[in-house]
Image: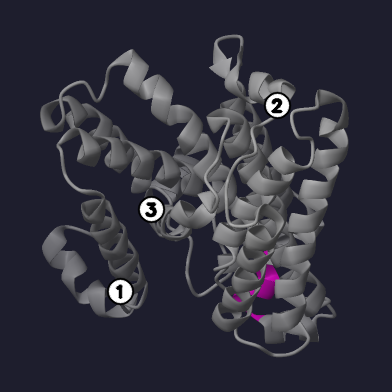
Amino acid sequence: MSPSSRLRTFVRSPYFPIWPATVALFLLSPLLARGSMEPSTIGGIIPFAAILAVASVGQTLVVQQRGLDLSIPGVISLATVIITLYPDGNDAVLPEALLLTLGACALSGLLSGLAVTRFGITPLIATLGVNALLVGTVLQLTGGTSKAIAAPLLDSLVFSKTGGVPNTVIVAVALIAGVAFIVRATRPGRRFVAVGSSPAAARAAGIPVRRYETSAYVASGLFGGIAGVLLAGYVGTPGLLAGEEYLLPSIAAVVLGGTSLSGGNGSVVATAVGALFLVQLDSIVRGMGAPASAQLIILGVIIALGMAVRRIDRQRLAIWRPLLGGR
């Protein structure tokens, strides 16, 4: 396929609109909220956009398998608690704490995956139940109070930059590029997409459907854990339930990125751009002096519109193409 053909295919894809929308948002930002494009402001939001992007990657993979992961808040909260509480400020045990954190988060994803694939529980109920279990674990570990502080080494690694680029962004880009390559260019990735598109057809082709569906939830738990570690290192003293703010944004980022809620194809790169869009939008809303409730309303509208648009029958729109100059 020639470069021009690839460009036309990309422009016609559902993943394209978020790119010009994000560019337009940044161009309009100074007009909507003074100071929203100052270097200090941009420097402050980029790490949080990277953290949201990492969490949203896992959500994208679950959505590609026709599911939805509502346990992300609990996973991120558990990760921030373990990575700060276990080392207790001691850099020497930080590697051990990191392995424990990511292992616990991957295990929570496995629990969700097994509940969906082995016991036939709907994804919403299964992940909501796992989220409640994780929140209860967080409260049990902390006694209901948040006092732990990130180890100095973690704070230094996450908060610093490499070549002028925040380390959070480097980690996010590496993870997103890795997932995008696996999904698009490897045999397991193509099988993963096939399972999401049609589990029945994939099963008939001899693909272990349950294994791929479960792996999506495990990956979501793992990426949620990484997001929690980055968040703990960046803020230093995360709140007790620091992950509560990431549920709706992670879903909205997937919707904005154009990943089909009916499963199959998706783009973690477009999801990451959607995360950047949302964080900048939040910065503008706050800069305009709007209450936090306004951001929740915006997120709800984005998700509702995204779900509605996906239900539109494209064949019905075909009759309007001649009037619009299309083919």
Task: Give the side of residue 11 with respect to residue 294, left or right.
Answer: right
Type of amino acid at the residue the image marks with label 3: Arg
Secondary structure beneath label 1: helix
Task: Give the side of residue 277 with respect to residue 10, left or right.
Answer: left
Given residues 35 and 169, the one toward you in this image is: 35
Type of amino acid at the residue the image marks with label 2: Leu
- Residue 201: where, in percent of width, then height? 70, 83
Which part of the image, by quadrant, shows the N terminus?
top right
State how many labels appear: 3
Q: Is residue 269 above or below residue 150?
A: below
Mark 3 or mark 2, which is nearer the start of the sequence?
A: 3
Which residue is labeled 2 in the image? 154
- Residue 83: where, in percent of width, then height? 72, 41
SS assignment for the magenta stretch, majority: helix
Callout 1 crowding tier (Cα within 10 Å): few <14, some 14–19, many ≥20? few
User: Is residue 65 visible from the viewing direction of this image?
Assistant: no
- The boundaries of the magenta stretch are 193-198
Is residue 98 located in the magenta-colored stretch of the structure? no
Residue beneath the point at 55% across and 71% down = 68
Given residues 124 and 177, the one toward you in this image is: 124
Q: Is residue 172 above or below residue 223?
A: above
Residue beneath the point at 45% across and 29% down = 46
Which residue is labeled 3 in the image? 12
Secondary structure beneath label 3: helix
